[in-house]
Amino acid sequence: MARLARELRHDIITPTKTGYNVKKVSDDMLRDMWAEGRKNFDKGFPDGVYVAPCEKNEPTVKMRELFAYCKKVGKRPAELTDEERQQFIGHPDF
């Protein structure tokens, strides 16, 4: 029982008509739920590009690649040099 208590670390709270439901989940379950949600989300963008609408000729940022690079080099986005950041800036062809 003590092992089970250590594994239950997160609450997922969902609103209902009469209040809230609380579901306790482990790290592994939460990670699986996140991965499944991300996979379903990605299906909606087959080319891998999703951005908020921007003004004409406004540059875009390749966020997924940016965060993958940050993880690889052990830095936060704010810690990158201008040269490092530049590789993730896209210029749309309008």
Image (cartoon, grey):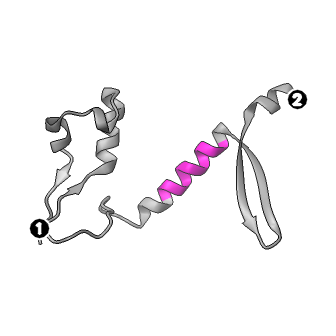
Q: Residue at x 33, y 63 (%)?
A: 50
Which of disc 1 and disc 2 is earlier in sequence?
2
- Please rate how many residues cluster around mark 1, counting C-alpha atoms within 10 Å: few if below 14, some from 14 to 19, many from 20: few
Q: Secondary structure at mark 2?
A: loop
Q: Residue at x 32, y 58 (%)?
A: 48
Image quadrant occupied by the C terminus? bottom left
| Magenta span dominant secondary structure | helix
Residue nearest the viewer, comparing 5 with 46: 5
Q: Is residue 30 magenta?
A: yes
Q: Residue at x 18, y 50 (%)?
A: 89
In the rendered view, does 62 fall on the left or right side of 35? left
Labels 2 & 1 near each other (Cβ < 8 A): no
| Residue at the spot of label 2 | 1
Percent coordinates x, y for residue 34 in the rendering: 56, 50
Q: Secondary structure at mark 1?
A: loop
Specify the farthest residue to the right.
Answer: 1
Between the C-alphas of marks 2 and 1, the distance is: 59 Å
Is residue 13 positioned above or below 77 on the image? below
Residue nearest the viewer, comparing 66 with 56: 56
In the rendered view, does 17 fall on the left or right side of 10? right
Region rendered in magenta: 29-39
Percent coordinates x, y for residue 82 in the rendering: 16, 38
Residue nearest the viewer, comparing 39 with 6: 6
Percent coordinates x, y for residue 28 in the rendering: 64, 38
Q: Residue at x 30, y 37 (%)?
A: 78
Q: Say what amino acid the circle numbered 1 marks.
A: Asp
Q: Which mark is residue 93?
A: 1
In the rendered view, does 28 fall on the left or right side of 15? left
